[in-house]
Amino acid sequence: MDTGGEAWTHSQGLLRPAERDFMLAASLFDDARALSVDQSVDQFLRRRERDPAVRQAATAARAFVEGFDAADPAIASVRAIADEWRSGVDFATARPVGGYRPVFEYLRDACVAAGVKLCLSTLVRRIAWRRGAVTAAVSSGGGSRTVQARAAILTLPVGVLRRHGDETAVVFDPGLPPVKREALRSIEMGHVVKVVLWFRRAFWERVQDGRFRDAGFFRFEGHPFPTYWTQMPLRSRLVVAWAGGPKADALSGLAETDRIGRALAGFGTLLNEPELAHEEFEGGRTHDWSRDPFTRGAYSYVAVGGTRARETLAASVDGTLFFAGEATATDGQSGTVNGALDTGERAAVEAAASLEAGASQGHDG
């Protein structure tokens, strides 16, 4: 279902409609595609923030880069951001009705029906490979074993692929080719703190004579959680608080209860109803993806100079190792579930074609 609802921005103590904020912010990046030398988003926007005519749009652009891309403007490539945003022309967002659980269950059932063996709660520790052969050392339930195959599709997040030198790293033997390692150095893992709040009633629909009844998105400038959204067009008691990039880093050391408390306090302040927000509050949940050893961050963005890094990371190695995941999306869908699913299908097609070619040439592997 397409997301919907009105957009609002809280600035200088007031909430105002902000339907065109993203379009105006995105238009600032039109000139970035023509840059002869890539630069950071921060460098690109600092000059524009000095211009009173576009200062507000530039400030919004910085906030969207941090929030939407979970990126640090001092590191993020402005050319990559410009290509991704496409001036907002093709932007549309959706969410699955009922959450992602039904999606996962559908994929699981389809795989099992096709004869796939699923090994859940299983850790891959080491991947030894040569052309046409892969051996993965795995552990589960306190035991270790090996899994052998002719090819492997790797969907590990960039934050995990970049990890080395500790017990949570996946060791490749031999190591990944230099071009892969260089690509991984040019793709950063964005950080996000996301808090889900639920209330007894959707009280925000009633305050100020129902002014925010159809609100779908709130932007709160200068607050630890600069973004909140409802579930519009569904009427729901659930609100999501979001902080990305440097603002997420600033929240990383807080305990779960403190994060939830700050998100709740921010939502109450945003609506100028702090007491009512606390009265209506029922509970909250959050997860520290940056410290999760299986993710090491939220999703990826490209650093300065890494224009072709996603394409390089997506390329297969010796017809044996294939790469998927949002970080390998090259069509502007990085950082999305769409990108993860599409690249998984792409890698599966590549692997199948390679195996068929090997079989036709008499290679058992």
Image (cartoon, helix red, strand yellow):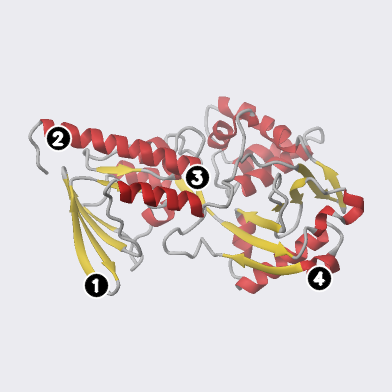
The percent coordinates of residue 194 (x first, y second) are 61, 59
Q: Secondary structure at mark 3?
A: helix
Where 71 falls versus 274 (above or below)? above
Q: Residue pushed farthest top?
A: 34
Dividing the picture into quadrants, the one containing residue 341 is: top left
Closer-to-camera residue (228/225)? 228
Mark 1 and mark 2 lie on one chain; the one further toward the N terminus is 1
Whichever of labels 3 and 1 marks the residue nearer the N terminus, that label is 1
Disc with the residue nearer the chain's start (2 vs 4) = 4
Q: Looking at the image, tell me whether mark 3 or mark 4 is earlier in sequence order.
A: 4
Residues at marks 2 and 4, CA–CA distance in whole angstroms:
65 Å
The amino acid pointed to by label 3 is Val
**Picture coordinates of residue 302, whole percent (x, y):** 49, 42
Quarter in which the N terminus is drawn: top right
Q: Secondary structure at mark 4?
A: helix
The residue under label 4 is 279
Q: Which amino acid type corresponds to the residue marked 1 in the rendered image?
A: Gly
Per the model, the C-alpha gap separating discs 3 and 1 is: 32 Å
Mark 1 element type: strand
Neighbourhood count class around disc 2 (C-alpha, 10 Å): few under 14, some 14–19, many 20 upward: some
Residue 65, given in percent of the width and then of the height, sits at: 63, 44
Residue at the outermost left position: 362
Compare marks 4 and 1 and give the one earlier in the sequence.
Answer: 1
Q: Which numbered marker is on residue 358?
A: 2
Q: State which mark lies toward you, 2 or 4.
A: 4
What SS does tag 2 mark?
Answer: helix
Measured from the top left, where is residue 37 in percent x and y?
52, 31
Residue depicted at 79% across the width and 46% down the height: 9
Q: Which residue is mark 3?
A: 337
Mark 1 = which residue?
143
**Which amino acid type corresponds to the residue marked 2 in the rendered image?**
Gly
